[in-house]
Amino acid sequence: MGQLHSKPGRSPGANGGGRRVYALLRAQLADGTLAAGARLPSTRALAADLGVARNTMSVAYEQLAAEGFLDTARGRAARVAAPLVTAARSAARARPLDAARLSAFGRRVAQMALPPAPAAPAARIDFRYGAVAARDFPTLAWKRAYQAELLRQQPHLYYAAPEGEAALRQALPGYLRRARGLNCTAAQILVVQGTQQAIDLCARLLLEPSNAFAFEDPGYAMARHGLEASGARLVPVPVDALGLETGALPADAQLRLAYATPSHQFPLGGVLPMGRRQQLLQWAQQQRSWIIEDDYDGEFRYGQRPIDALQAIDTEGRVIYLGSFSKALSPQLRLGYMVLPPSLVPLFAKAQRLAMRHAPVLEQRVLAALLDSGAYERHVRRLRRENERRRSALLGAIERHLPADARVSGSAAGLHVVLWLPFLRPADEPRRVAAARGEGIGVYPVSPLFVRPPGAMAPRPAGLILGYASLTLAQIDEGIERLARAIADVTGA
């Protein structure tokens, strides 16, 4: 197979059309848009597509072949030459990030050690917290409501209100009053793309690099990183069996915000009692600070009615309530909401419009229809029963298969527990996780969720976060049995 070469006096620069065609093809060949070995259209077909003469196309092909970008031979279609494309792409990948050309925000994000991005299940039985069972999704109800909204005639398709769809914002206050005790109006609600986007808005609008924010220790790592991206100073506040130790909140003029999970502390599971809730609100009023109440799984409490949200007793407008559909429906839906103090609504709506215009409209209307019909609340009740069975299966399996001194915290609510192993140290967690992975079990250490170094805290045993909402009862039992073998391998039991 030989290559065609440019003939003397002919080059793609001979006319404007030739230069345009040559530059277009060369750019796509150089950056890998046209993959190595890919077959190119004939000069006749491509000339027709691009609106140029076939002779112009032939000259461009000949020049690219002469430069080594194409392999050509008489009677065969031209193909992309592999070596030059690979080299060009490798050079682009190897180019280092120039931090000096980033903003301060960009430099902070570049230096962050974020948790690994979610991937496909890493083990056959994965106790990943935050995952929910695909079979629990209300497929038929969602499909009916989705089709109805899809077929609903609209006068036109255009951008929507940044605050969210009116139908969803009007449906949420009644539901939140019944389910979580909230006292709010539709005008206080901002629909967002999940809790993480809500935290990002709070960080951008309420914190300066010269400020500080209080955060539960241990706590939800992605929320912490989202707030740290503002450049504000992190002030870790210890957590005990009841949740945030509100008596440890400092009186610091720079503290502009506190993040808390009062209904089910993440990850330890404490439920903040009324006395501490009032103390937290008094602290915020004295500090003139905001409180982010992340109610990430408040609908799931077992054996009694879910505890009302902190926002329900806030009389001074200090609480920013974050709610999500991730645990009741799916984290892939990427829809959540904020209940804002009235004074903050215009500001957050403007920022929402600048950042992403608005959340997906069709899905908002579907959720509104499910809320209005009562289908969503029926689904949550059914899901609560299913997850209570899973929780009971998990606690029973731990009692049957694990050593007697293993203990559990945070089982009264939510979709995960923390398993404490007093016979292991925090430093043993990585080895234990690896041994479990060898048994086909995905487990997750609690240590990365602590902010303070071990020497700054009271001694504690190794801990494991076990999410159970995505597993069957049989998987839960088998998973804990296999975990027991992995622990025995590590401890030599």
Image (cartoon, rainbow, N blue to C red):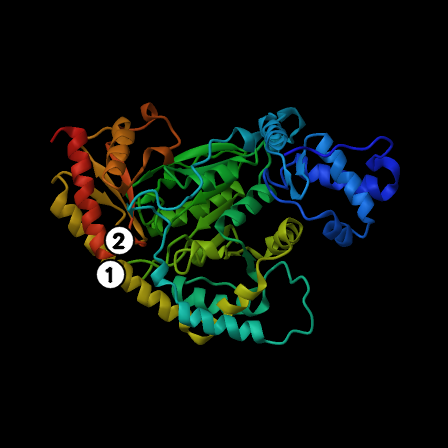
The location of residue 471, given as percent across then percent down, is 28, 54
Judge from the rendering whether residue 303 lies leftward or rightward of residue 404; answer left or right.
right
Q: Dot 1 surroundings within 10 Å: few (below 14), some, or many (20 or more)?
A: few
User: Is disc 1 in contact with disc 2, using a CB cutoff of under 8 Å?
Assistant: yes
Q: Which residue is mark 1?
A: 303
- Which of the two labelled residues, at mark 1 and mark 2, occupies the earlier sequence position? 1
Residue 423 appears in the figure: no
Q: Nearer the viewer, residue 59 or 220?
A: 59
What is the quadrant of the N terminus in the image? top right
Judge from the rendering whether residue 21 lies leftward or rightward of residue 151; answer left or right.
right
Q: Which mark is residue 377?
A: none
Q: Which mark is residue 412?
A: 2
Q: Given the image, on which type of amino acid does mark 2 rest? A: Ala
Q: For residue 491, what is the image quadrant?
A: top left
Residue at 29% in and 40% down: 443
Q: Nearer the viewer, residue 162 or 12?
A: 12
Residue at 78% in and 44% down: 57
Residue at 38% in and 29% down: 452
SS for dot 1: loop
In this rendering, the count of numbered labels is 2
Q: For residue 176, what is the image quadrant?
A: bottom left
Residue 184 appears in the figure: yes
